[in-house]
């Protein structure tokens, strides 16, 4: 008896899984929604039969899958390169700011070391130099023949023979 009941269930499943049975169920559902008897509902489109994929469809499916995965991988790679470039740019910006700060500090240090007050103080403390009480100026004596034309050239006519090979 069990096997007979099982056979009836399987038979019923087979009957309900045919395209015609599915079309009848769709028609009945549409009729319930429209509050009409199922016989009056007319469907304009017959359901398309399901066929197995052909080799062309299978190839197109694989090409689509490969292109999609390749595109996603390419986008991920591009994103990684973009993030790496951003990190490198951020590091360079930070290094430039540090170098600018160091440059400003060194300029301040050079200005401090080159100041006349510091130089005088260092000369007095380390080297023992003192400021003279009086500043004297030396003057060079005037040449005896200041009126001659050679005075401005510094004795060029006397020096020229020694520089014969040079301009």
Image (cartoon, helix red, strand yellow):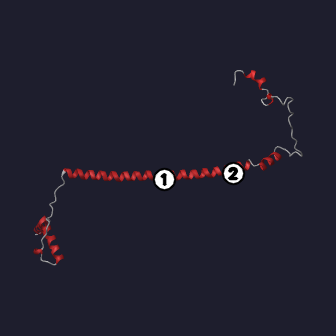
Image quadrant where residue 1 sits: bottom left
Q: Is residue 128 left or right of residue 3?
A: right
Image quadrant where residue 138 sits: top right
**Depth check: 113 or 72 in front?**
113
Q: Residue furthest right?
A: 133
Residue 86 at what x, y percent from top left? 48, 53
Q: Give the mark nearer the N terminus: 1 vs 2.
A: 1
Quadrant housing the C terminus? top right
Residue 147 against residue 89 in the figure, above or below: above
Residue 65 against residue 145 in the figure, above or below: below
Residue at 18% x, 76% y: name it: 33
Where disc 2 sits, the SS reads helix
Residue at 65% x, 51% y: name it: 104
Q: Is residue 93 left or right of residue 51?
A: right
- Given this view, does label 1 or label 2 mark the residue nearer the observer? 2
Residue 158 at what x, y percent from top left? 78, 23
Q: Is residue 16 left or right of residue 126?
A: left
**Depth check: 116 or 143 in front?**
143
Residue 34 at what x, y percent from top left? 17, 76
Where disc 1 sits, the SS reads helix
| Numbered circle sitting on residue 161 | none
Q: Residue 18, can we see it?
A: no
List the residue tagged with mark 2.
108
Label 1: few (<14), some or many (≥20) within 10 Å?
few
| Numbered circle sitting on residue 86 | 1
């Amino acid at each position: 008896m069990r096997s007979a009941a099982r056979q009836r269930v399987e038979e019923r499943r087979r009957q309900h899984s045919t395209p015609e049975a599915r079309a009848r169920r769709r028609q009945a559902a549409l009729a319930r929604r429209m509050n009409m008897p199922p016989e009056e509902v007319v469907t304009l489109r017959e359901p398309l039969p399901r066929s197995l994929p052909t080799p062309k469809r299978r190839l197109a499916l694989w090409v689509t899958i490969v292109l999609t995965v390749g595109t996603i991988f390419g986008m991920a790679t591009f994103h990684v390169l973009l993030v790496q470039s951003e990190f490198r740019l951020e590091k360079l910006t930070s290094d430039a700011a540090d170098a600018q700060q160091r440059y400003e500090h060194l300029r301040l240090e050079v200005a401090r070391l080159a100041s006349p007050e510091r130089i005088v103080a260092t000369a007095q403390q380390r080297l023992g130099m003192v400021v003279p009480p009086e500043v004297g100026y030396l003057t060079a004596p005037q040449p005896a023949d200041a009126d001659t034309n050679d005075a401005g050239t510094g004795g060029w006519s006397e020096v020229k023979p020694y520089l014969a090979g040079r301009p």
